[in-house]
Amino acid sequence: MQPFTKQILERQAKPLYLVPCVITQVSPLQVSMLGAANVPAVSIPGCTYTVNAPANALLTSPGKPIILPIGP
């Protein structure tokens, strides 16, 4: 099973929100969202992340958001 799919299945019992964000740091991955800067986040293996690029965060509580990059 893909790591991303496994993470989603583990969170399915909790509400999951899609929140727009901006990448603020690539390694370790951090984003700015909901008025908070430099929020630690989880990357998806094989995806490319760029500083200042828009993205979407899959957010549930507790836990770090999983970041979905936008674009090619």
Image (cartoon, rainbow, N blue to C red):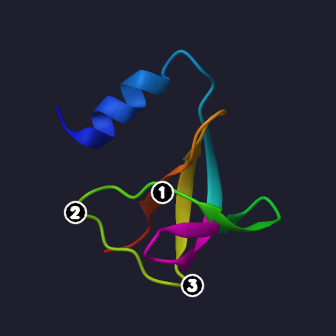
Residue type, mark 2 in image: Gly
Instruction: Give whichever of discs 3 and 2 has the lower sequence position.
Output: 2
Q: Taking 3 as reference, is 36 left or right?
A: right
Q: Residue at x 45, y 54 (%)?
A: 42
| Inter-mark Cα distance, 1 to 3 | 13 Å
* Range of magenta residues: 21-31
Q: Tell me the crowding category of disc 1: few under 14, some 14 to 19, or many 20 or more residues within 10 angstroms, Cα based.
A: many
Residue 30 is a magenta residue: yes
Task: Locate residue 64, reporting x and y percent.
Answer: 56, 47
| Inter-mark Cα distance, 1 to 2 | 12 Å
**Looking at the image, is 54 positioned above or below residue 20?**
below
The secondary structure that dominates the magenta segment is strand
The quarter of the image holding the C terminus is bottom left
Residue type, mark 3 in image: Asn
- Residues 7 and 16: in front is 7
Residue type, mark 1 in image: Ile
Q: Residue at x 66, y 33 (%)?
A: 61
Residue position for label 2: 46
The quarter of the image holding the N terminus is top left
Instruction: Give whichever of discs 1 and 3 has the lower sequence position.
Output: 3
Q: Secondary structure at mark 1?
A: strand
Q: Residue at x 43, y 75 (%)?
A: 27
Task: Locate residue 29, reporting x and y percent.
Answer: 48, 68
Q: Residue at x 83, y 64 (%)?
A: 35
| Disc ID at residue 52 | 3
Residue position for label 1: 67
Q: Tell me the crowding category of disc 3: few under 14, some 14 to 19, or many 20 or more residues within 10 angstroms, Cα based.
A: some
| Disc ID at residue 22 | none
**Looking at the image, is 8 positioned above or below residue 50?**
above
Task: Locate residue 54, reporting x and y percent.
Answer: 55, 73
